[in-house]
Amino acid sequence: MVAFTPLAIAATTLLGLTSAVPAHQVRSTGITHRITAGSTTANNGLHFEPENVVAEPGDLIEFSFLPKNHSVVQSSFDEPCAPLSSSSGTTTGIFSGFNFNTTAGEAPNVFTFMVKDRNPIWYYCSQTVGNHCQMGMSGVVNQNFGSGDKTLDMYKQNAKGTVTKQPSSDPHAFQGGWIEKNMNL
């Protein structure tokens, strides 16, 4: 006869619960970092503010958009102004699309994504009218400050000699996040 002690039941229940939650799932921390795409003063409006953010897994990154029809595209440090892609060339990173055109003030919608880990997320604006990326409109979430040469300043310097690549032929396509109403208006 098998006897179940309260400890055995508790251990079985705990093991059952932990195996039911996927190991890769990130839970929300409830913290939102707000970044503005465009600026009224810095770099003639070609600027993310702030452009360097430190965030924890589960934090949300929310982009609001000012005039000049900006976008947010994830890239790698080694290929600024080019969308993050798999070895087959499929875009794998974050892309807001050009869904936030406004002639004055903030756009009525924002683009938001959740931080999955502490790895750097390099990003740029893919607007080619005015070469936004080459002009320094880029940023990073979780820059590795101990990496020496992989800094935001170096990313911007490397971007100057590139050609901006779009992640999609559809300017309204987006991935890696979601579009929602700008609650700050």
Image: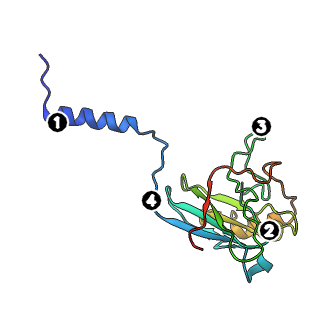
Q: Amino acid at mark 2?
A: Gln
Q: Earlier in the sequence, mark 3 or mark 4?
A: 4
For image coordinates 44% across by 59% down, the residue present is 29
Q: Earlier in the sequence, mark 4 or mark 2?
A: 4
Q: Which x, y percent locates residue 30?
A: 45, 62
**Mark 1 vs mark 4, CA separation in Å:** 31 Å
**Camera-side residue of 55 and 78:** 55
Q: Which mark is residue 157?
A: 2
Observer-side mark, 3 or 4, equals: 4
Q: Are marks 3 and 4 in contact (CB under 8 Å)?
A: no
Observer-side mark, 4 or 2, equals: 4
Q: Earlier in the sequence, mark 2 or mark 3?
A: 3
Q: Secondary structure at mark 1?
A: helix
For image coordinates 48% across by 64% down, the residue present is 31
Residue position marked by numbered label 4 in the rendering: 29
Q: Earlier in the sequence, mark 1 or mark 3?
A: 1
**Mark 1 vs mark 2, CA separation in Å:** 60 Å
Q: Which mark is residue 88?
A: 3
Observer-side mark, 2 or 3, equals: 3
| Above or below 79: residue 32 | below
